[in-house]
Amino acid sequence: VLTGSNCFAHNDRPDTILDAAKILLRSDGYLCLEVMYAGDMFDMLQWDVLYHEHLTFYCLKTISDLLKKHGFYVIEAERIKMHGGSLRIIATQNPNKPVKKGVKEIIAYEKEKELSNPQTWVTFGQETGEKIRIVKETLGRLKQNSRVWGYGAAGKATLWVNACKMNYLEAMVDASPLRAGKLMPGTHTPIVLPEELKSNPPDYIFVTAWNYAELIKSKEKWFNGIWITPLPNLKFF
């Protein structure tokens, strides 16, 4: 068995990875890959995962076609919740292995959603622009009379604060000591540890790591202000 979790789509030469996999695996071996799933990105308008290190977003059809060119055949697939929605596949070099039900179900879903149609992704871009506009205008009004912080200094945060011009955020909270003490790219918002949030709580916290919002909220139960998440729809809670 050869595995690759959340690394295959970071490489601009997937052919070299698959050629190496053929060398390493016996003919009856299994290749298991996990990638962020284009279907979930489309369903929830997750434009905020589209940054430099994520070079490719696969649906099952596209990754199956790529693997087939290199002598691998997908026999099992499932959708999982990791990273806002991922695809986990198992492939083999034996074209006669039976294909599990999950593969057929996901392929049927992709046909229904027309994920291979370029117009689908043009629409995705248009709807993404509308999501950004709503967040930008809503928080822009809030900051006029309220104090707003951010939470989660990951890649998603960089996209949101720059697309929405959030140079008014007083701070971006992050539990990582590797990030605390630094600044957000573009807006230069200071990144601080959660302890600073307790000493100076704002009125609103914009959770840029929105897919972990419930976990973050559970760690900060003392906070009496209002939480905000931007996706799948702008939400106050």
Image (cartoon, rainbow, N blue to C red):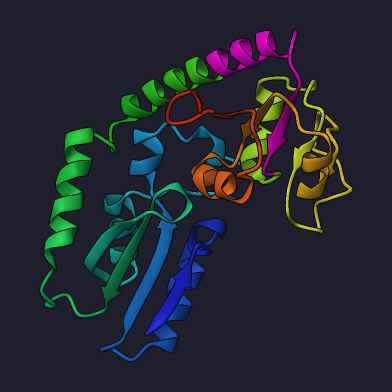
Q: Give the x, y percent position of residue 12.
A: 56, 56
> Is residue 146 magenta-colored?
yes
Q: Position of residue 9 (x, y in %)?
A: 50, 57
User: What stretch of residues is rendered in magenta?
Assistant: 133-152
- 117 or 90: nearer the viewer: 90
Quadrant for residue 21, please give it. Answer: bottom left
User: Is residue 50 in the magenta section?
Assistant: no
Image quadrant occupied by the N terminus: bottom left
Residue 116, compared with residue 131, is above or below; it is below
Residue at (23% x, 34% y) in the render: 113
User: Residue at the location (51% across, 33% down)?
Assistant: 47
Q: Quadrant of residue 80?
A: bottom left
Q: Is residue 119 left or right of residue 8?
A: left
Which residue is at 32% across, 51% downward?
Answer: 62
31 with respect to 20 (left or right): left
166 sits to left or right of 128: right
